[in-house]
Image (cartoon, rainbow, N blue to C red):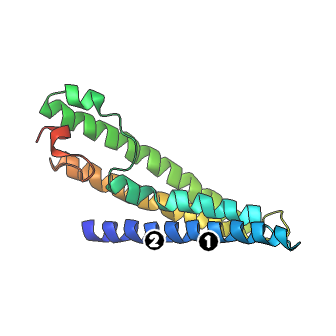
């Protein structure tokens, strides 16, 4: 299970990197196009969708590698047993919030698909495309957070936390 989750988050991270590269290419094309009087249709929209995709698709990988901002000042003041309990509480809340977010993203994406909603720019981009990427990114985050929660409940230190942080 852990290996599948790691590969899922890594795959999402690769897609995030590709979306960021695509965003740079689109913006660069727009800048160069302006110099020569060439319009790059819907460039701001495409760049925005790429930015959202890169942000959401990188959530799980960033979480797994300790890249999210954590306020661990309180954890350092707690004893080892309380540190793990506090970590479990935080991971439980994160799992619930991620699940809530995923539920409504899936609902929104399905509704957008059924309605056939498209962007309002020069190029009519089906909005389900960027929404699917957001949904997959949050699903990857949920699996990573839930995996860390299960591990913490079993007494295993989460991969993003240092040994000193949890007092092991």
Name the spot of residue 133 as percent of width and height, x first. Answer: 56, 66
Distance of label 1 from label 2 (alpha carbons):
12 Å
Name the spot of residue 66 as percent of width and height, x first. Answer: 33, 50
Q: Which mark is residue 11?
A: none
Q: Is residue 133 above or below residue 146?
A: below
Q: Is residue 117 visible?
A: no
Q: Can you tell which quarter of the image residue 134 is in? A: bottom right
The quarter of the rendered structure image containing the C terminus is top left
Which sits in the foreground, 152 or 112? 152
Name the spot of residue 69 as percent of width and height, x first. Answer: 40, 41
At 37% from the left and 53% from the top, the residue drawn is 63
Q: Which residue is mark 1?
A: 22
At 14% from the left and 28% from the top, the residue drawn is 79
At 26% from the left and 70% from the top, the residue drawn is 3
Query: Is disc 2 placed on a helix, strand or loop?
Result: helix
Q: Residue furthest right?
A: 37
Q: Which residue is mark 2?
A: 14
């Amino acid at each position: 299970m852990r290996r599948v989750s790691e590969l899922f988050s890594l795959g999402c991270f690769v897609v995030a990197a590709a979306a960021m590269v695509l965003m740079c290419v689109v913006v660069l094309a727009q800048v160069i196009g302006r110099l020569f009087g060439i319009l790059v249709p819907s460039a701001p929209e495409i760049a925005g969708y790429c930015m959202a995709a890169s942000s959401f698709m990188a959530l799980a990988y960033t979480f797994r590698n300790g890249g999210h901002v954590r306020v661990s000042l309180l954890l350092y003041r707690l004893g080892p047993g309380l540190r793990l309990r506090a970590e479990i509480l935080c991971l439980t809340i994160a799992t619930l919030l991620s699940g809530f977010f995923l539920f409504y993203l899936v609902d929104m994406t399905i509704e957008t698909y059924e309605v056939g909603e498209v962007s309002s720019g020069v190029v009519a981009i089906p909005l389900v495309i960027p929404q699917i990427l957001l949904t997959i990114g949050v699903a990857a985050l949920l699996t990573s957070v839930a995996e860390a929660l299960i591990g913490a409940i079993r007494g295993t230190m989460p991969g993003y936390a240092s040994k000193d942080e949890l007092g092991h």
